[in-house]
């Protein structure tokens, strides 16, 4: 009996270590209005990372994640909680359904959650979000700037002044506002992690404004890292290729959504759970204490960027 039980345990353990299956392109044709709800995407983006085992890398840390309700931000929130952190997430009012699901999952992982509704384009809101986080949890150790706005346009002439300003205010002004507000509370060993993009390195003909902001984020990361290195606060950036999130389902016609990520060597978009461990790596002083000012690309097999 003992031998059979041991054999069953080994088989179960072996099954749990099998590579996670991820859907390949083509995806189902679909489209949503902005900002998009992850709960309505088919197939649902994978964010639970069942093969990822926490090891207290972020034990007793407090993190604040913008755009933390869905997509990459949600997956990062879940893994941060699995590693021992309490997590506050910033989200737009329209994303309440997704935000609640993320908060529930943070708590299932053993972390405390805090939902902060608002728009990072507003500097006063960013200051308020930081203060609410510190009031709730007593401190702030990790800031993840992740909120983004994206809108494809075929021609420069099609980009309105309003779109240009919205993209910049969300994607780079918001990062600046959050970092500036957080700095008052960050101490030695604290971390800022920014979300960049391959478009910020290679450009994208239909994403002129978005690509420009992502390039700015990469430069902001390197410059802020230099600025804060003597304070022993590290600043790094994750720059993914295509990722299966609401951002892209809202920004493409249904037929193009189906082909999203198919042009990568892996023939599919990344799932959020595949991107999130890189944020844990940058957040953990155990893993990356000597790394600051770095932009890491996650491209599904592409070997050239920039």
Image (tube, helix red, strand yellow):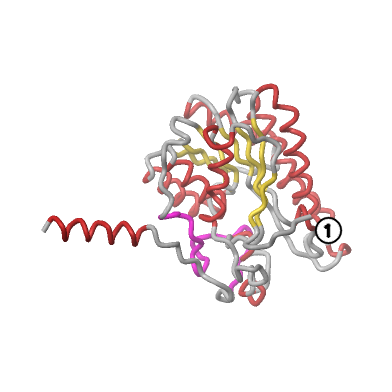
Q: Which residue is drawn at 70% across and 35% down?
A: 177
Q: In which quarter of the image is the C terminus?
A: bottom right
Q: Quadrant of residue 247?
A: bottom right
9 relative position to 108: left or right: left
Where does label 1 land, which residue? 160
**Camera-nearest residue between 202 and 64:** 202
Q: So how many labels did they put on this image?
A: 1
Give coordinates of residue 28: x percent, y percent. Answer: 55, 75
Label the magenta part by its dominant secondary structure: loop
Q: Which residue lies furthest to the right in this view?
A: 157
- Does residue 34 belong to the magenta stretch? yes
Give coordinates of residue 117: x percent, y percent. Answer: 56, 43
In the figure, 34 relative to 115: above or below?
below
- Does residue 294 belong to the magenta stretch? no
Q: Which residue is drawn at 75% across and 28% down?
A: 227
Give coordinates of residue 245: x percent, y percent. Answer: 58, 60
Give coordinates of residue 132: x percent, y percent. Answer: 54, 31
**Camera-nearest residue between 108 and 51:** 51
In the figure, 115 relative to 11: above or below?
above
For the residue labelled by badge 1, is the local secondary structure a helix, a strand or a loop?
A: loop
Q: Quadrant of the N terminus?
A: bottom left
Q: Label 1 neighbourhood size at 10 Å, few (<14), some (14-19), many (20+)? A: few
Boundaries of the magenta span: 30-50
Q: Quadrant of residue 26?
A: bottom right
């Amino acid at each position: 009996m003992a031998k059979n039980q041991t054999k069953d345990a080994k088989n179960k353990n072996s099954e749990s270590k099998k590579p996670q299956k991820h859907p390949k392109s083509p995806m189902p044709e679909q489209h949503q209005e902005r900002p998009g709800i992850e709960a309505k995407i088919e197939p649902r983006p994978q964010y639970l990372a069942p093969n990822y085992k926490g090891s207290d890398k972020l034990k007793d840390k407090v993190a604040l994640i913008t755009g933390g309700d869905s997509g990459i931000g949600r997956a990062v929130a879940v893994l941060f909680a699995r590693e021992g952190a309490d997590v506050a997430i910033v989200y737009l009012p329209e994303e309440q359904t997704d935000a609640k699901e993320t908060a529930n999952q943070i708590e299932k992982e053993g972390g405390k959650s805090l939902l902060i509704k608002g728009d990072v384009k507003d500097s006063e809101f960013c200051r308020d979000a930081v203060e609410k986080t510190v009031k709730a949890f007593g401190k702030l150790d990790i800031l993840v700037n992740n909120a983004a706005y994206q809108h494809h346009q075929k021609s420069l002439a099609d980009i309105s002044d309003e779109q240009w300003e919205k993209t910049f205010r969300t994607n780079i002004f918001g990062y600046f506002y959050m970092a500036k507000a957080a700095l008052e509370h960050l101490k030695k060993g604290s971390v800022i992690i920014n979300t960049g993009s391959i478009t910020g390195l290679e450009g994208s003909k239909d994403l002129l404004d978005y690509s420009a902001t992502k390039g700015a984020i990469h430069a902001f990361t390197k410059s802020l890292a230099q600025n804060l290195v003597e304070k022993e606060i590290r600043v790094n950036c994750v720059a993914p290729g295509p990722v299966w999130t609401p951002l892209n389902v809202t920004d493409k016609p249904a037929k193009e959504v189906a082909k999203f990520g198919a042009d990568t060597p892996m023939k599919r978009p990344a799932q959020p759970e595949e991107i999130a461990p890189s944020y844990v790596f940058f957040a953990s002083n155990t893993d990356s204490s000597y790394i600051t000012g770095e932009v890491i690309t996650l491209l599904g097999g592409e070997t050239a960027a920039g």
